[in-house]
Image: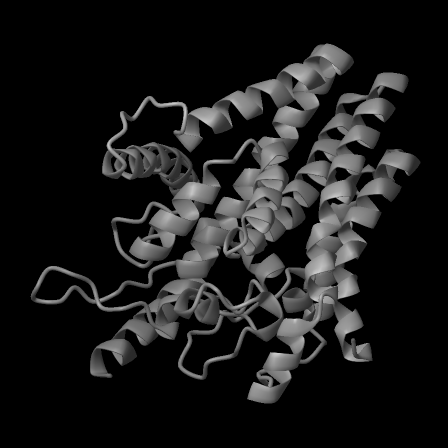
């Protein structure tokens, strides 16, 4: 491990702020929200972007270092520890409605930005062990179907109208939320039915992962309800909703308005670096384990986060991911900034 690798420890600031917020209470209850939507957007206005890539030799060395994997694995005890801490603290105190809302946002940000985000990285790994860890991280978000839909649906259909997670030009975030959440869930059922059909099995078979996921999520919620009653149940459900909506707003900004060409055969052109919005703001890259180098991720989904590359031809967001998320919440402002950029990228893509 080299000293420069320690930069990824910055990602732990959010869950640590989550613990701090719950412990301190009051105005501090927002915890991780201060890191994700205040500290990082402000600092990214002053810190440089980085377009540098590792050499082939450096990539080989980084791939062999277990440090990068353990950074991800440790999110499991941290995430579940934070949820347990929040539930126990709520049970022991009489929170006001404002403290409760702040804690939902605090906990939900960690569930979305670190639970789902790290699950996304591990879900692309080949080993059954790491795929299982991915599902464990998706459970608190009540979004286990993401494992199926993202890997077998989104990556196949990205940047087409067949993909509910690829935002259309002029589509508001709020319309996209409904379409992506419902469409992704239904697609996951369809994909599992197709997989089982190829095995000669009925859709409603015990090997259907979607059935298994519903049972696991029900067990999780039943356990929370049993030990922490309805208040605890409401807290984890509300936090999960905020967490997966955060994931979906990231989906929204990653592919907004970008479309692959449909060929005369009816098929779409192969996925290229031009079909995802990137951000080279280095702080956000580190904070989200290089998720913002999204073009390379879609170009080759098996590449681990520590070796993802910058592509000169990939369209670049004018702001980092956290700032872009905040802009997307205001559709008129988002459209005024992004629609001209989409038009420019589309025009260039047609010429190329």
User: In the image, what residue occupies the spot 74% across and 36% down?
Assistant: 80
User: In the image, what residue occupies the spot 90% across and 18% down?
Assistant: 92
Quadrant into which the N terminus falls:
bottom right
Which picture quadrant has residue 71? bottom right
Residue 169 at x, y = what percent? 32, 56
Q: Could you tell whether 131 is left or right of 184 in the image?
A: right
**Which of the pair 306/269 is nearer the observer?**
306
User: In the image, what residue occupies the spot 72% across and 11% down?
Assistant: 226
Q: Could you tell whether 321 is left or right of 262 in the image?
A: right
Residue 100 at x, y = what percent? 76, 26
**Which of the pair 143/197 is nearer the observer?**
197
Residue 323 at x, y = what percent? 60, 60
**Which of the pair 131/239 is nearer the observer?**
131
User: In the image, what residue occupies the spot 60% across and 80% down?
Assistant: 60
Q: Residue furthest front?
A: 200
Which colouring convention does the figure follow?
A: one colour
Please tell me whether residue 29 is drawn above or below residue 36 in the rendered image. Answer: above
Could you tell me how many numbered marks the image carries? 0
Q: In this rendering, does residue 55 appear at all?
A: no
Residue 36 at x, y = what percent? 70, 54
């Amino acid at each position: 491990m080299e000293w420069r690798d320690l930069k990824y420890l910055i990602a732990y600031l959010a869950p640590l702020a989550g613990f701090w917020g719950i412990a301190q209470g009051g105005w501090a209850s927002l915890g991780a929200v201060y890191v994700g939507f205040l500290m990082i957007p402000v600092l990214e206005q002053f810190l440089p972007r980085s377009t540098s890539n590792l050499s082939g030799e450096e990539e080989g060395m980084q791939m062999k270092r277990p440090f990068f994997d353990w950074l991800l694995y440790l999110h499991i005890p941290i995430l579940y520890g934070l949820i347990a801490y929040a539930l126990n603290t709520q049970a022991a105190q009489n929170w006001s409605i404002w403290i409760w809302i702040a804690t939902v946002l605090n906990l939900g940000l960690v569930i979305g930005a670190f639970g789902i985000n790290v699950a996304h990285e591990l879900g692309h790994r080949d080993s059954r062990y790491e795929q299982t860890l991915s599902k464990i991280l998706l459970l608190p978000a009540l979004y286990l179907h993401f494992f199926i839909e993202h890997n077998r649906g989104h990556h196949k259909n990205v940047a087409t109208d067949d993909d509910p997670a690829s935002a259309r030009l002029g589509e508001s975030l709020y319309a996209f939320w409904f379409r992506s959440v419902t469409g992704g869930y239904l697609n996951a059922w369809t994909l599992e039915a197709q997989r089982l059909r190829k095995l000669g099995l009925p859709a409603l078979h015990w090997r259907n992962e979607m059935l298994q996921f519903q049972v696991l999520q029900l067990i999780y919620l039943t356990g929370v309800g049993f030990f922490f009653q309805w208040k605890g149940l409401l807290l984890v459900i509300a936090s999960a909703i905020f967490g997966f909506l955060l994931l979906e707003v990231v989906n929204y900004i990653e592919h907004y308005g970008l479309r692959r060409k449909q060929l005369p055969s009816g098929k779409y052109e192969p996925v290229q670096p031009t079909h995802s919005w990137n951000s080279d703001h280095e702080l956000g890259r580190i904070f989200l384990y290089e998720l913002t180098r999204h073009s390379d991720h879609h170009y080759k989904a098996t590449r681990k986060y520590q070796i993802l590359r910058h592509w000169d031809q990939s369209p670049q967001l004018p702001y980092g991911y956290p700032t872009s998320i905040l802009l997307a919440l205001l559709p008129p402002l988002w459209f005024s900034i992004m629609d001209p950029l989409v038009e420019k990228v589309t025009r260039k893509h047609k010429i190329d």
